[in-house]
Image (spheres, grey):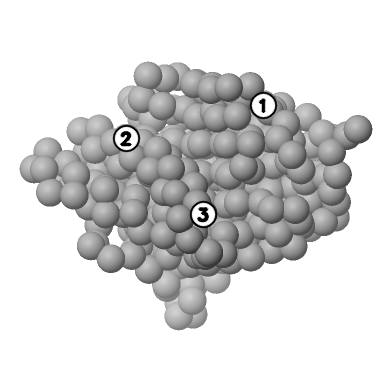
């Protein structure tokens, strides 16, 4: 993990990609913890996360592509999105939501250019970028990494998967419950780097005291059912780091067939005096 200036920036990067990486910080209205784990089946970790404590910006990415190309795609995402988001805010009158979209668009261009190199063919990455200002959370996302909101004991998935399986669910071929046993291959239909132009989703949410946000890659959501995620978050009792580890342990006990990254953000309406 790398930290810069009073914990203002933290991320897992290529230097620690094969290790379990964890983080716990407090920034503004958020208390945060994060952990990334290679899992039980993979040799390397192609997941990346980034947290900027000063601007309340969170980015999570799940790379795809052979021979470390997925790692490169995710790494580009967590480096470019924060930089391009800050530049968009400085150089325009765009809203935070528009700046997030600009940041994902610029990251997509950078990854798409790298994918033209033969050894990087097929590279891409999911991405969720979320920015908090006061009580307003703006989110831009693409792919099948997820953001959940846990509010007063109820779990809600804020993002919508961009995947073949989700399309089949939307078309009525499966329900959420039956989809886990379909055997349908995990095919992402939208991601950064696979096309010259992207179609990302934009979401906004007004935060409330005590809200808990869960950002995760599909290494968690594919292996841990929503009810188990909800029960784990209900038992959190403020220990975000322990809860991150508990969720990852659930995924590994259920097979651990993929990298798994979890970021938890607990919202409080005012800083402690």
Q: Give neighbour class at mark 3: few <14, some 14-19, many 20+ (Cα, 10 Å).
A: some
Foreground residue among 31 and 145 = 31
Residues tagged 1 and 3 counted as in contact (Cβ below 8 A): no
Residue visible at 66% across and 32% down in the picture: 33
Quadrant, the C terminus: top right
Q: Secondary structure at mark 3?
A: helix
Q: Quadrant of residue 83?
A: top left
Q: Does 170 appear above or below 119?
A: below
Q: Give neighbour class at mark 1: few <14, some 14-19, many 20+ (Cα, 10 Å).
A: some
Number of marks in the rendered image? 3
- Real-space CA distance between mark 3 and mark 2, rounded to the nearest whole angstrom: 27 Å
* Numbered badge on residue 89: 3
Residues tagged 1 and 2 counted as in contact (Cβ below 8 A): no
Residue visible at 64% across and 65% down in the picture: 204
Q: Which residue is mark 2?
A: 71
Residue visible at 58% across and 36% down in the picture: 52
* Numbered badge on residue 24: 1
């Amino acid at each position: 993990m790398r930290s810069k200036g009073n914990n203002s920036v933290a991320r897992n990067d290529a230097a620690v990609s094969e290790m379990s990486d964890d983080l716990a910080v407090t920034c503004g209205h958020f208390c945060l913890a994060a952990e990334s784990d290679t899992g039980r089946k993979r040799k390397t970790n192609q997941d990346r996360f980034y947290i900027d404590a000063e601007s309340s910006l969170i980015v999570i990415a799940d790379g795809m592509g052979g021979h470390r190309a997925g790692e490169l795609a995710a790494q580009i995402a967590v480096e470019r999105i924060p930089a391009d988001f800050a530049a968009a805010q400085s150089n325009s009158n765009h809203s935070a939501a528009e700046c997030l979209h600009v940041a994902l668009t610029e990251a997509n261009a950078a990854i798409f250019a790298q994918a033209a190199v033969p050894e990087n063919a097929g590279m891409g990455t999911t991405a969720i970028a979320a920015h908090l200002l006061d009580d307003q959370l703006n989110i831009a996302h693409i792919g099948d990494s997820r953001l959940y909101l846990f509010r007063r004991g109820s779990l809600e998935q804020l993002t919508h998967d961009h995947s073949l399986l989700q399309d089949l669910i939307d078309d009525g071929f499966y329900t959420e419950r039956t989809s886990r046993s379909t055997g349908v291959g995990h095919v992402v239909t939208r991601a950064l780097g696979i096309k010259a132009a992207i179609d990302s989703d934009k979401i906004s949410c007004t935060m409330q005291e005590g809200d808990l946000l869960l950002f995760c890659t599909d290494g968690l959501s594919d292996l841990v059912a929503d009810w188990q995620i909800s029960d784990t978050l209900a038992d959190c009792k403020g220990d975000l780091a322990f809860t991150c580890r508990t969720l990852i342990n659930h995924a590994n006990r259920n097979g651990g067939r993929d990298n798994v990254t979890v970021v938890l953000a607990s919202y409080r309406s005012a800083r402690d005096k």
